[in-house]
Amino acid sequence: MRDYKQIGLKVGLEIHRQLDFNKLFCNCPSILRENDPDLKIKRKLRAVVSETGKKDIVAEFEEGKGREAIYEYYSDCNCLVELDEEPCHEMNKEALKAALEASMIVNAKISDEIQVMRKQVLNYSNTSGFQRTALISRNGNVEVKGKKIGIQTICLEEDAAREIRKDEKTVTYRLDRLGIPLIEIATAPDMNDPEQVKDVAEYIGMILKSVGAKSGLGTVRQDLNVNIKGHPRVEIKGVQNLRDIPKIIENEVKRQLEVKNGNSEVRMVKEDLTTEFLRPMPGASRMYVETDVPNIKVSLENIKKPELIIEKSLKIEELGISSELAKELIKNKIEVSKYVDKFSNIEPGFIAHVLIEIPKELKSRFNVESKFSENDFIEVLDYLNKGKIIKKAVLEILLEKAKGNKIDYSKYGQVSDKEVEEFIRSVFKKELSDNAIIGIVMGKYRGKVDGKKVIDIINKLR
Amino acid sequence: MVKIGDKIRVITKDENLEGIFMPSDDKKVVLKLNSGYNIVVDKNKIKKTEVIESYKEEKIVKEKDFTFNKNLKTISILHTGGTIASKVDYRTGAVSARFDPDELIQMFPELKNICNIKSKLIFQMFSEDIEPKHWSILAKEIEKEIKNKVDGIIITHGTDTMSYTSSALSFMLQGLNIPVILVGAQRSSDRGSSDAGLNLICAAQFITKSDFVGVGVCMHESMEDKTCLIHKSVKVRKLHTSRRDAFKSINSKPIARVDINGKIEFLSEYIKKVKKGNRKLEVKTGFENKVGILKTRPGMTNKELEFYKNYKGLIIEGTGLGHMPVDVVDQYTKEHKLILNSLKKLAKKIPIVMCSQCVFGRVNMNVYSSGRDILNAGVISGEDMLSETAFVKLGWLLGNYKDKNIVKMLMKENLVGEISERNSEEFLE
């Protein structure tokens, strides 16, 4: 085990996560496409020359590759804005709200007025030649496993187009992803242990999910800023899986210690979790004002600090619901406490089971698609709460409901143990197997008796 | 005194901020932070501002290898505004338009191998602010350049009223024997995706590699950075607010298709360059501003026509084949009689020309009785002219010919390609 303190390891994180709203500067839905595009458009970009006659170092590096871009356009998730054929619209209010909420969670200082910037990007991943990005807040912090980690900035920006193909002459980008709102949280270089970096990344990921971020592969990207004493800072892009973070840092530290005169540069993670050179480190010089959107005066009215998923989950678990079910309830935005308060005779764990697991079971076992309303659940749970039906009947009732059938609840009423025992006695024959007897009993009392009880009675008679 | 570009420290109640002082207004201070982001601070919250480092302007690097090449033709670029060429001050984020030939070449290095460049700033304005007087000034500037023996002229122009200017120049510069091409951009040149470069380079290629003379408009053919079209100056309209291919030829094929390498494909008949002395330039820059354009509509009243009684000419943008509400058919259409009466009265005083709101197609007032009533009132058919072109033509005729009958007669004649004798099948393809 390497002594990271001794080599002076400092790691900062930049987490980019897509938000589950329409695009940031137009009203297109944020969906990805795998079918053939409706249109392909060829374009070229050129670096904008600076006042002093210089071109930005990164811009020039990318322009120098001299390729032509082919953009794949989808009419259901793209419009003229992504094609750079129309000025951008106003910033998506929901996305801004999410960024403000995230800022509140980490106690960051929110700007009074937000100015949208253009960050020049000439690798063709943005049709305009720049990425729109806005600084929302600064100087916050999070506490992870007892250690305080500084949050330098929270930005709201648009995602880039997806690279599909690349050869000597052209690079093909798909425009579906272009413009999806991203929250970017950048930490201070306060971490000095690779495992800690993973924990912090996980925690920040949870914060972002709490304000409406998307989940799943491709919705989140982590960049790592890795610095060891006496070596220039290196930025590592393309970290997809949190689990890989410690290994990537370890590999990078090893590389930096081996290289004599390293450069401050941007590197890309490879499949084997080592890194390769991507491009020079960009300077502040490639940012200028997006003049197509007016500055946004921030109003915090109607915005309050949202509850973290982790807090919500703990509250649900306290009711006696498993953490797995708690996660699913939060994901599906179901307020289980409402049901628990209302149906005090039912165990909360079973309520969660009905709300989450039964619809899944109907699909997997009976191949029935269910679209239950809140009232459907309330109706069934109310019968159960009043003892008018038995627990076992809930699945069958919901199956009938999902099929669109009318429910006769009297069919599912409880039968007394005495009645069941009398019936079993009346049909009992020694030569009949247990299964045969159970079959007969269930034929009469399906949904009204527990199988276990029937077996108990049969055993008594044998 | 804090200057734009200075590195400063701003101290507020709860924080110290360091950054570059950016253009700000009197209520706030805009700072560019180290990260490149701008931050806006309310002036009321600032306790103290200190200059950390005064901004020293960096020397502007000029393109060194720009020399006159006698094997290449010379193009004069006259700038009127719009942002064909801009530079960004990355320190302050300010964008400024650039006009020096060497700076143009620095931005569009391809130009160096196409032509020699002269460059002159005539105006710097949004095209919506351009007045007929500016057309006259521009025409005279072009005349000067022709006397200086340039091979062609590029005029950079905002796109909004570009086709008004191109039409005006066609009328004002009679007997033109060099190409004059107007170029604009739908995406400003402070972004990497600007269409300015291709439009400018294609215009230069067309000028140097073709025998076309006259006024044309060079803009993107499609949403791709592939080819540009050269449109006839009097047959083109901006048909889209924002797309690169906003300019379309109306009731005419474009003159030619050009690509960045100078491949030219002619698409229609055009006027060719003749030997020196065989065609004489005649510059007529008179223009009568008091010409109106009236768009007819359901619910219009005769008052709207009477507004023009002190004008010198009027273009009516009628409906369909050249109609306006002049029939009385029931109790709700009584006003229409007043409209017809006002029209008759007005047409006795000033030339009135009918064009169509349809944009595409030719006016024909003989088909329906209402059209015949309008013709009989003394309204002139604008044939297949765009209403903007008809407006420019009428203003120019009134500004240069005193006799109203000559004005009316010339209005019906094709002078510079504004009226087509035959209309082809092309329509929004």
Image (spheres, rainbow, N blue to C red):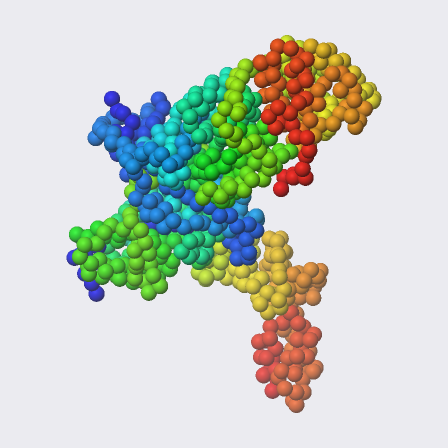
Q: Can you give x and y, in whole percent of width and height, for residue A437 in the image?
A: 65, 82
Quarter of the view holding residue A344: bottom right
Residue A147 in view in this figure? no
Where's the C terminus of chain B, which quadrant? top right
At x 66%, y 20%, the residue is: B411
Q: Can you give x and y, in whole percent of width and height, for residue B5 in the image?
A: 28, 29
Position of A89 with respect to B367 (left or right) is left
Q: Can you give x and y, in whole percent of width and height, for residue A393 in the image?
A: 62, 66
At x 25%, y 29%, the residue is: B57
Q: Residue furthest bottom?
A: A431
Between B176 and B262, the residue placed more toward the observer is B176
At x 35%, y 48%, the residue is: A64
Residue B284 in view in this figure? yes
Q: Can you give x and y, in whole percent of width and height, for residue A251 in the image?
A: 26, 62
Between A192 and A260, the residue placed more toward the observer is A260
At x 23%, y 60%, the residue is: A255
